[in-house]
Amino acid sequence: MTSAPLAARLREVAGPLFFPVTAFGPDGTVDLDVFRAHVRAGTDAGAAAVFACCGTGEFHALTLEEFRLAVAAAVEETAGRIPVIAGAGYGTALAVQYARAAEEAGADGLLAMPPYLVVADQEGLLNHYAALAAATGLETIVYQRDNAVFTPETVVALARTPGIIGLKDGLGDLDLMQRIVSAVRTHRPDDDFLYFNGLPTAELTGLAYRGIGITLYSSAVFAFAPDIALAFHRALDSGDDALANALLDHFYRPLVELRAQGRGYAVSLVKAGVRLQGLDVGEVRTPLGEPSAAHVKDLIEIIASGRTLLEEHAAEERAAEERAAEEPAAEGHSAEGHSASGGRA
């Protein structure tokens, strides 16, 4: 657990938000050693925060004890360097159990997943998240998607709820998000409520979300290609539109199109990507299935394309630096020539 409040830490982040996969061994049980290695590698690579046992981490497939152990492992591996946020979901009673387990494991905060199966009205949703936030001392981010879609008025009420610090949007309705941001700003002008772009490959819509002031985003890509995820994040922050657009066109868009080829690929394709990098995190648990061999081959090619772009960009930057270094020297030689010529006259 980190010492500073989660909201304050997240307002200052300078890198992608890391959603690790949960590693399973050959017998199907959670492999904590491999999971630790995965979390450690992501932390060392420059993640701004770890979201353990959330959607990409197959929260839906974990027992309460597996969840507790995995969250504790993530907390130990990060060692306070970056915050750890744990998923919590299902109905209110079960969600509270997971939230308390996360608190016991040392997590810094919660990502409140949508309620399981049922469709509730706005008051019911508000009551659910208020009860979850009140159950622990952890700061809570509410996840908007599927059967948990909020009106601007409900988000204003969420922002007024003690313990709730932000909203992660997995819906992708920019009109709704703009109205939500405006409503909270109007009715809670002194409340620095946090917003996150939480779409499955959030980088693809990163520019659009930044247009309404939302800069934080989840990065599934960081789990298997942190070099690409970091380069894209830096390109957005520095205004390097050429690199950002090249990665969007030749890496992120093809990845999103591949992800759409199979159900559950938002998780299983990420896990396949981690395995391709040499870390055997195992397969996904049922009911999810593995990507086809052809789609894994496509994934290999997409990752290679992204890394080729980074190499080309780095070469262009080196060439530009060399040209810039040569220009002052050339100007100096020219000035010396003029001086010598003037002296002879």
Image (spheres, helix red, strand yellow):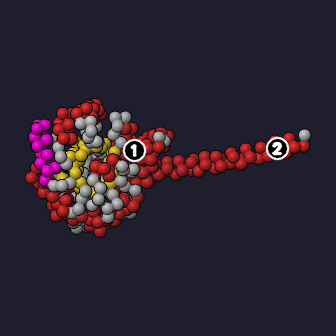
Of badges 1 and 2, nearer the viewer stands: 2
Where residue 123 appears, x then y in whole percent? 11, 38
Where residue 112 appears, x then y in whole percent? 20, 49
- Which residue is outermost to the front? 190
Where residue 132 appears, x then y in whole percent? 14, 50
In the image, residue 204 above or below residue 279: above
Residue at figure coordinates x 15%, y 58% from the top left? 100
> What distance separates the C-alpha of mark 1 from that of mark 2?
55 Å
Give the extent of the magenta segment.
120-135
Q: Which mark is residue 252?
A: 1
Q: Nearer the viewer, residue 240 or 164?
A: 164
Residue at figure coordinates x 20%, y 38% from the top left? 155
Q: Is residue 265 visible?
A: no
Residue at figure coordinates x 81%, y 42% from the top left? 338
Give the position of the N terminus as an image quadrant.
bottom left
Q: Which mark is residue 280?
A: none
**Image side of residue 343 versus residue 38, left or right:** right
Q: Which residue is mark 2?
A: 339
Please say whether residue 320 is one of the residues in the magenta stretch: no
- Which structural element holds mark 1? helix
Question: Does the magenta stretch mainly form a helix, a strand or a loop?
Answer: helix
Residue kind at label 2, given as amino acid type: Ser
- Which structural element holds mark 2? helix
**Image side of residue 56 versus residue 323, left or right:** left
Circle 2 packing at 10 Å, graded few (<14), some (14-19), many (20+), is: few
Res 47 → quadrant: bottom left
Give the position of the C terminus as an image quadrant.
top right
In the image, residue 25 above or below residue 210: below
In the image, residue 278 above or below residue 250: below
Circle 1 packing at 10 Å, graded few (<14), some (14-19), many (20+), is: many
Q: Is residue 104 visible?
A: yes
